[in-house]
Image: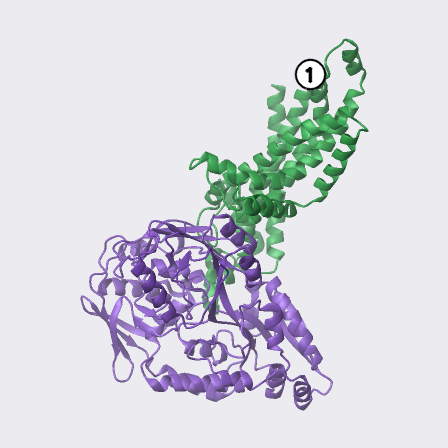
Amino acid sequence: MQVITRTLAAAGLFATLTGAANAQGSFNTNGTVVFYDAVGNLTLDPQEPQNNSSFAQGMIMAIFDALVYLDPKGEPTPGLAQSWSYNADLTQFTMQLRPGVTFHDGAPFNADAVKKNFDRVISLGARAGFASLETMAALSAIEVTGPMEIRLTLKEPNGQLPYLLGSQAGMMISPAALEGNAFGAQLKPVGAGPYRVRSAESNVRTNATRYDGYWGGTAGRPAALEAQFVPDGRARLNALRSGQANLALIDPRQIAEAKAAGLEVQVNEKNSTWDFYLNVKRDNISNLKLRQAMMHGLDRAAIVDALGFGASQPTAQLFASSSPMYMKELDAIYPFDPAKAKKLVAEAGYPNGVDVTWLLLNTTEYRTLAEAIQAMWGEVGIRVKFDTVDTSQFVQFKRGPRGDVMMARWGGRPDPLQAFQEVAGATGSVNPGGAAVPEIDTLIAKARAMSPDNPARMEVLRQLNKLTTEQVSHIGIMTRSAVYAFKPGCITGLPAYLPTGNDRLNDVKMGASCK
Amino acid sequence: MNALRYLGRRAVSTVPMLLLVGLITFLLIHITPGDPASVVAGENATEEAIQEARRRLGLDKPFLVQFVTWLTSVLSGDLGTSFTSGKPVTELIFERMPITLSLTAGATLIGLLIAIPFGVFAATHRGSWADRTTILVTSMGIAAPEFFIGLLLVLVVALEWGILPATGYTPFSEDPIEWARGLILPSLALGLGIAAELTRQVRGAMIDVLSRDYIQTARAKGLSLFSIIVKHGLKNAAIPVVTVLGLQIRRLLGGTVIVEQIFAMNGVGSLAVRAVFHRDLPVLLGVALTTAIIVLIINLIVDLSYSYFDPKVRAG
């Protein structure tokens, strides 16, 4: 049976699948899910910078439960925090913690444990990853107000806390493991998630067993979870075909091969896109007409046809089509129109064409896409010159000295507002030129001062999406997906998880016949 | 006593060689584009975090200071700590060395098991159809890169026939049978190239030896061909073959980098590849130094073997 399941609105699907299978008692709860992944973990410390990458979260989330869960669409729901509330002006955030939760070492989860975790991140300073730092930077005080209640005082009104605590900063580590300022490889990875670590080898494999004391229950969960980092896509698929793995992340180009081998393929579209970051302070890029020409000169459909392999959708935005943030009409603002693009280049003051320097990260994947776009833009008078650098040198763009534009794999953020902050805001980490127009920062500030349950927040975010697309603050190319392969019926419970670059392994299940 | 003095001299002569290896590797890594501090500080790190990582890793110091610090540490037996995993480099290399050594030993064994009988057979049937076929097949074997042979073996033996695993490594202590099964395909991928090269060497050396007067005399005395080959032929043909074998083992160590990727084995080759991507300088330096030591030991063994195979060398 060859089935491609496109998991778009996956929450409902997941509930249906797990519910149905549970009812039939058709899960293998004695087996081990052996997952061959394209990303590894250098350490199992959620606060370690490498683990703040959007693409390194799969096992981390299964080991360390977070205070807040983000549902598959990214909306905050109760996790280790059972409920929370803001004061009227969003300067205090109080959480009621879930009772009866224990860490893998048997230690109770309570407000003291939460405070100890937060204090530890603050004490790490610049050693901690950016996501955790960003969260702690918003706090001015942490107060234990009861055994199971904690209050955070914020430096300024900030409605983003529930999102931020749904990612690394909210991942709770057992207080005993934090003794002695353990960090990175020295940290004993003791969390409160559904899987406890049995052994781990840096950037090679992580073995975890089901935690029978997990507050969320153990029904249907496999006995163990093993993630192996195998960088070569062919080796991952081969391992699956010959039985060393029962779940593998494959390259989109391998979809046809996997199907031909009788495997089931699941495409999880993500809030992760191929995107251009722009330096709007540069003479050429500061010109809106030129930015618009770049948009019109991009044949996204052709790129997706040639390089998407059925796992990408053309988009000018930063969100998956299943995200509440996605606005179909925005993708129609700048259709592929080479004649119009050429006219706009001339109107921008470049009748003989314009040179654009592209800081190109030197990998085959990037280069293939870059050469296609270089040819398209060349047709409309935008002469791209590659300034090729190693991937570790992409800070050269962030700092501003090199590159008018840079293309990268945007990995998504827990809060959609963060996407705009990073890519289009004045202090954005990949936006060296600042906001294209001041209204972007105004809207960002407005949204930040709204709580997630305020319906007006979504309206402001949509305005931001519209404004950043119209003003071409960034140039979206196509969405990215996590593509999984497994033997038919072997794996369920792996819905698309929009807030991070990869998916949660927390609820993955094995079919009864799966080994 | 002479042998001990010889070993002592060789050991001393390796010191400048290892120093040079260390210096060149250090230099190469430093002129390669890429910023280890940015990698360690992580995706989207602030400038402050990158500078803090640079200071913590000692990368803010001048090149020579960094080199001398590393060298001092190496001389005291410490290869340093991995930038990325925070583990001692020696521990990382020792953890993975059994995989790479198993692979190298397996490939060498396969090379010898194929090369000796086929080389001898071709030499004793010189000019025959079998000899020409051997030359043709070995030429193809030499030309075919390890990754090509590896992928072909996986496709046919693991995926089509399903009789051996396509990836992975099981430690001998866990399951000796699975250990052996997991090593067959990668060892073949690495070893077939060596087998081809060695077969030609064995053939050439045996043709030379078999034409010598003492072999003709042995034949005239009525000794069987088997006895002539085993007692007189192979030992006398061994020197050029062992020399090439030594060179091939060095090639094997390089080949493991590719083969470990294809078969998803986490040996020293794979450690080196990841260290390159993460700009993990201490690990790269440790791997380069360890590999250099292994190569020097192999050279020494090859040199010492000459005196076993040829008493004239011993006398000299």
Q: Is residue B260 above or below residue A102?
A: above
In the picture as drawn, the residue positioned furthest to the left comes out as A146
The answer to whether residue B30 is seen in the rendering is yes
Q: Position of residue A222 (x, y in %)?
A: 34, 53
The chain coloured purple carries which letter?
A
Q: Which residue is mark 1?
A: B231
Q: Is residue B126 above or below residue A116?
A: above
User: Which color scheme is applied?
Assistant: by chain
Near mark 1 (Cα within 10 A), the count class, few <14, some 14-19 or many ≥20, is: few
Q: Is residue A469 above or below residue A367?
A: below
Q: Position of residue B197 (x, y in %)?
A: 71, 36
The answer to whether residue A349 is seen in the rendering is no
Q: Position of residue A51 (x, y in %)?
A: 42, 61
Which residue shows up at 60% across the image and 82% down it?
Answer: A295
Q: Amino acid at mark 1?
A: Lys
Which residue shows up at 77% across the image and 16% down it?
Answer: B215
Q: Quadrant of residue A147?
A: bottom left
In this rendering, position of residue A476 left or right of residue B127: left
Label 1: chain letter: B
The chain coloured green carries which letter?
B
Q: Is residue B72 above or below residue A40?
A: above
Say which of B46 and B174 sits in front: B174
- For the residue labelled by badge 1, is the local secondary structure a helix, a strand or a loop? helix
In the picture as drawn, the residue positioned furthest to the bottom comes out as A347
Q: Position of residue B128 (x, y in %)?
A: 80, 29
Q: Quadrant of residue A41?
A: bottom left
In this rendering, position of residue A165 left or right of residue A204: left
Say which of B272 and A137 sits in front: B272
